[in-house]
Structures are given as C-alpha cells and as structure tokens.
Amino acid sequence: MVWSVVTTRLNSVGFTFSTGQLFWLTALPALSGATLRIFYSFLVPVFGGRRWTALSTASLLFPALWMGLAVQDSTTPYWHSC
C-alpha cells in the first residue's frame, strides 16, 4: 500500500516516469508479494509461527529503508524504456 502511494508522487518530486512505468512500479511489488506468499505457507512449519513472522517482518525493513533513501534524490538511476 505504501509503495502505491509513493509511486503516484514520484513525478511530482523530480522523477520522469511514463504512465506505463508507474504502472509496473506499482504492480511488481504486489505480484512478487503474491508469489512469495506461496512460500510463506511452507516455511511456517519449518521455522515456527512466531519466528517466521519476526523474520519476514524484519525482511521488510530493507526495501523500506532503500525506498526512503532512493526517493530523496531525483538523480537515482532508473530503468529507461527503449
């Protein structure tokens, strides 16, 4: 949800993404999250419910911190469409 809100504001803070690029930036986290949810069902019995919840929640800190740093600088490199 946070990423969807951030992507709608990227062009207003200095980035120049096309509508198609913004769509993909919004869609890819949801697609990867849906795919990784499959593994979630298999790893809970391996690690235990509380431990797996702590590990999976802690793993969300990395992309959140990266996003916070990346959107502060409009010269952050991004993929250009050909």
Image: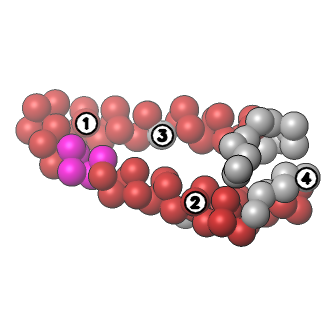
Kind of residue at badge 1: Trp
Q: Residues within 10 Å of mark 1 (few under 14, many from 20)?
A: some
Q: Position of residue 38 (x, y in %)?
A: 21, 51
Q: Residue at x 60, y 41 (%)?
A: 64
**Residue at 88% over, 62% down:** 12
x and y, in percent, of residue 42 in the image: 12, 42
Q: Nearer the viewer, residue 27 or 40?
A: 27
Near-viewer residue (29 or 20)? 20
Q: Between residue 8 and residue 19, name the one nearer to us.
A: 19
The secondary structure that dominates the magenta segment is helix
Check contact, mark 1 vs mark 3: CB within 8 A: no
Mark 4 is on which residue type?
Gly
Q: Amino acid at mark 3?
A: Leu
Q: Which residue is mark 4?
A: 14
The Cα atoms of the two marked residues, 2 and 1, are separated by: 29 Å
Mark 2 vs mark 1: which is more N-terminal?
2
The residue identified by callout 3 is 60
* Furthest-front residue in this view: 82
* Cα distance in 3D space between marks 2 and 4: 18 Å
**Label located before the other in sequence (2 or 4):** 4
Q: Which residues are magenta?
A: 36-40
